[in-house]
Amino acid sequence: MQSQSPRPLATVLLFAALIVCISMGIRHTMGLFLAPMTQEQQWSREVFSLAIAVQNLAWGAFQPFAGLLADRFGARRVLWAGAVLYALGLAGMAWSATGTGLAASAGVLIGLAQSGTTYSVVFAAMGRIVPQARLSWAMGLVGAAGSFGQFLMVPMAAGLIDGLGWFGTLLVFAVTATLMVPLGAALTRGLTPAAAHAGQSAQAAMRQAAGERSFQLLALGFFVCGFQVVFIGVHLPAYLLDKGLSANVGMTALALIGLFNIAGTYGYGHLGNRYPKRMLLASIYFLRSIVVSVFLLVPLTPLAVYLFAAVMGLLWLSTVPLTNAIVGQVFGMRYFGMLSGVIFFSHQVGSFLGVWLGGRLFDATGSYDLVWGIVIALGVVAALAHLPIDERSLASRAAAPAAGR
């Protein structure tokens, strides 16, 4: 569906990219706060890990509802509310003195904020502007902005933590999050909400999607994606510290993941316009398992870490444009925000387990070895699960039998 806005597509994509850059950039700095906050507050790693796990679960749980609100009433108010909640959550995280307070601020508030300021809501607005033939490319471009945010924010956070401490850094990020309010207004200018009651209802669309095997397999794949990337993103710096490497190596690794993810997300989004998206997704998950296996087998040096980060970065969020493009391609854009939100909820259930089990199993066993093994096995499962996905639209599937009669 085309927008009523006469603005150039490049302008719209710029505002979408800036929103995702800020929201995802701040999100990817969470792992840098683990060591200083737990040491100063005398918390175990599981306390911090549980709060971030709650954040991921809350993000996923609220995402279908945020997407549905954006579908039905427009993305602007959802983006505004998400930006305000993000600022409140970061400020609350700074002043948290207990694990419960941390779970409420860094967990629930920031998770709710992310559901209103990230891919499903932003892509829902884009879907009313970008032609279907270019949607995978556009999603890849905006997804790459999230990677650039990681590349930009991780070293910024490290520098701010060194200079201002973790408390001051969280307050700086709280102010930064408010920039998404004017950006949300700019992105959605000229768009009017879709008619709420014409055609298929949201409940009918959800029932239809839930019964589709391809939808179920996409959800399984995104579960694995969440488990893998959040475990690595949060626990890799601590893992490297445990192995005797400096904190700077972990910071650089996260920044490299963000840098190379720019190319990976954009590149895979572009390839999704040319090749079967399910095959590209299968290759991403399979390659992740290979890369992690090699990383664990070779001697652990800063160079090995940087190479791991660079290759993993190419595979990091490259699943996002491909998975979302399949959802839009199969089910259309009318309830895209809601349906992609449901898929994303599965991602965040995986994220919850990845970050929480990372801390829980480390405290229980003294190492991350068991979780690394789970990461490898799940990658193989996800690769196989994507092979039978049917990328044809529901309308074309219904027309095919009729054409054969």
Image (cartoon, rainbow, N blue to C red):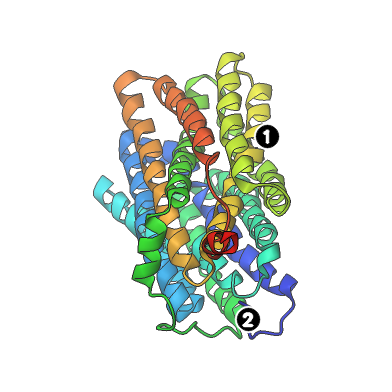
The answer to whether the residue labelled 2 contacts the one labelled 1, judged by CB atoms less than 8 Å apart, is no
Asked which quadrant contains residue 199, the reply is bottom left
In this view, the residue in front, 268 or 385, is 385
From this viewpoint, which residue is outermost toward the front?
405
- Up the image or down, 198 lies above or below 140; here it is below
- Asked whether, in this view, residue 55 is left or right of residue 314, the answer is left
Pointer 2 local density, CA inside 10 Å: few below 14, some 14–19, many at least 20 = some
In this view, the residue in front, 160 or 355, is 355
The total number of labels drawn is 2
- Asked whether, in this view, residue 126 is left or right of residue 384, the answer is right
The residue identified by callout 1 is 310
- Residue drawn at (34%, 69%), measured in percent from left and top? 203
The residue identified by callout 2 is 3
- Residue drawn at (55%, 43%), measured in percent from left and top? 162
Residue 349: x %, y % from top left: 37, 46
Pointer 1 local density, CA inside 10 Å: few below 14, some 14–19, many at least 20 = many
What secondary structure is found at the residue carrying circle 1?
Answer: helix
In this view, the residue in front, 59 or 208, is 208
- Residue drawn at (55%, 74%), measured in percent from left and top? 184
- Asked whether, in this view, residue 374 is left or right of residue 305, the answer is left
What secondary structure is found at the residue carrying circle 2?
Answer: loop
Q: Amino acid at mark 1?
A: Ala
Residue 108: x %, y % from top left: 33, 57
Q: Amino acid at mark 2?
A: Ser
- Residue drawn at (66%, 53%), measured in percent from left and top? 144
Of the two numbered discs 2 and 1 on the same chain, state the one appearing first in sequence: 2
